[in-house]
Amino acid sequence: MMCSECALGFFFDPVKIGIIAVSLFVAILSLCMVLRRDLPVQRRVYFVYLHVAALVFPFVYYLLFSGCSALASGCSRFLPTVYLIGLTGVISALVGSVAAPLIFLYGKSRSASALQDTRLLGFLEAECRALAIRVPKVLVVDTARPVAFSFSGLRPVIFLSAGLLDLLDRKESEAVLLHELMHIRQGSSLLRFSSFFMRLFSPLAGFASLRHELNNDEAAADTFAILRQGTDVHILSAKQKVNGYFEFSEAS
Amino acid sequence: MKGIKFNTDFESVLSPLENDVLKVLWPDRRMKVRHIYDRLRPSRNVALSSVAVILDRLHQKGVVEREIETGRGGVRYIYFPLKDRAQFEKSVIDTTVNSLIDKFGSTAVAYFNERFAEERRK
């Protein structure tokens, strides 16, 4: 049952307006922290999620508050309001930091199957040993578009598209795997996802672009592949093929 | 059909490269992108990535189907035509006739009747 009085009164209650103002202030403050290049990247990523959670907070608070009569505690009592704020905070934090990455990963994994190529997997294991990092799971996404990306969570995952593997020879595929391994080691997949996530949810994202850091990470991942392979031939030809695909696709 | 040259290409419904890719795919049935590329390369200057784009486009149009195959060479798409050449020709005729009827209605139907009667008399 909807508590219409509560719902309408929400916008005229100075306490609630104050709570929303504080939430927006936290969102802006966390955005300023995202902009600070002197902070470690990982910490800036936390502020991305705090920023999104703070932006989500007023909406969740309003939705929960509108249905407050269903909680059978009334709208005006102090304690239920405190509980409501707490619950809103938890839901906002879950949406802002846990749910979105999990939904993203689940969506991508659904259309993917584990890579069965033993030679490529053997190469990956050897490189992970050298880097002293956990061997990531490699999933093949069923799409002809040549794409590769990684995600470093509890268990790191590298996604390669079937279209990419179609285009690349063995050495080029190894170069791409090395590139993605470096991203996992740097934790830059989280940075990339956070940037995407912030652009998706925050109207203020334009003020705090992470493009500079992302470009740096890309260059570092390429350099790592070149150093490990002792040549830039493979990573460059892989990039040329991928760019060629998208250029031809757009032009024709 | 004296004086009429039947064009065996499908340039009205397919791009030149789509046409060439299908010409390679029809006789051999199941092929990898790289094999199609190897067959096309002597006759035309084309990149592997362009062949991959064209195959994906044919897949989206429902002309070819694909499966992921895992073998010694790694993971690869195997493409195969959903219709043989004759079936594809029929579907092109069907689409063309339908669009003419949609556009010209009874005039097109009357014309076809007249034309088929003429063909039967021959």
Image (cartoon, coloured by chain):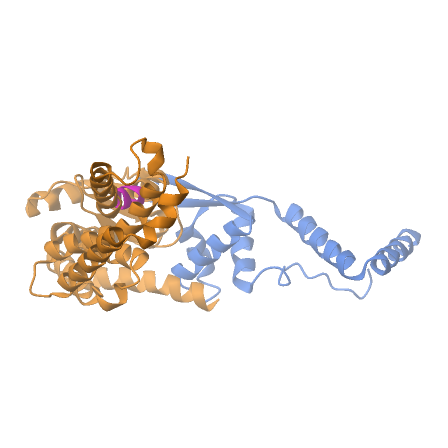
Chain colours: A orange, B blue
- Comparing A164 with A62, the one in front is A62
User: Where does the image place residue A19, in percent across and percent down from the top left?
Assistant: 22, 52
- B80 horizontally vs A180: left or right: right
Q: Is residue B65 visible?
A: yes
Q: Residue at x 90, y 57 (%)?
A: B114
Q: Residue at x 33, y 64 (%)?
A: A243
- A1 horizontally vs B120: left or right: left
Q: Main secondary structure of the magenta part?
A: helix
Identify the residue at the far top of this view: A72
Above or below, A2 relative to B25: above
User: Where does the image place residue A24, in percent across and percent down from the top left?
Assistant: 23, 58
Range covered by the magenta-colored residues: A99-104
* Rendered image quadrant of residue A202: bottom left
- Comparing B71 with A246, the one in front is A246
* Rendered image quadrant of residue B1: bottom right
Q: Residue at x 10, y 59 (%)?
A: A227
Query: In the rendered image, which quarter contains the N terminus of chain A?
Result: top left
- Comparing A104 with A131, the one in front is A104
Numbered disc total: 0
- Comparing A156 with B31, the one in front is A156
User: Where does the image place residue A22, in percent across and percent down from the top left?
Assistant: 19, 56
User: Where does the image place residue A105, in percent across and percent down from the top left?
Assistant: 28, 43
Q: Can residue A101 be found in the magenta stretch?
A: yes
Q: Can residue A94 be found in the magenta stretch?
A: no
Q: Is residue B74 visible?
A: no
Q: Residue at x 32, y 47 (%)?
A: A62
- B16 horizontally vs A214: left or right: right
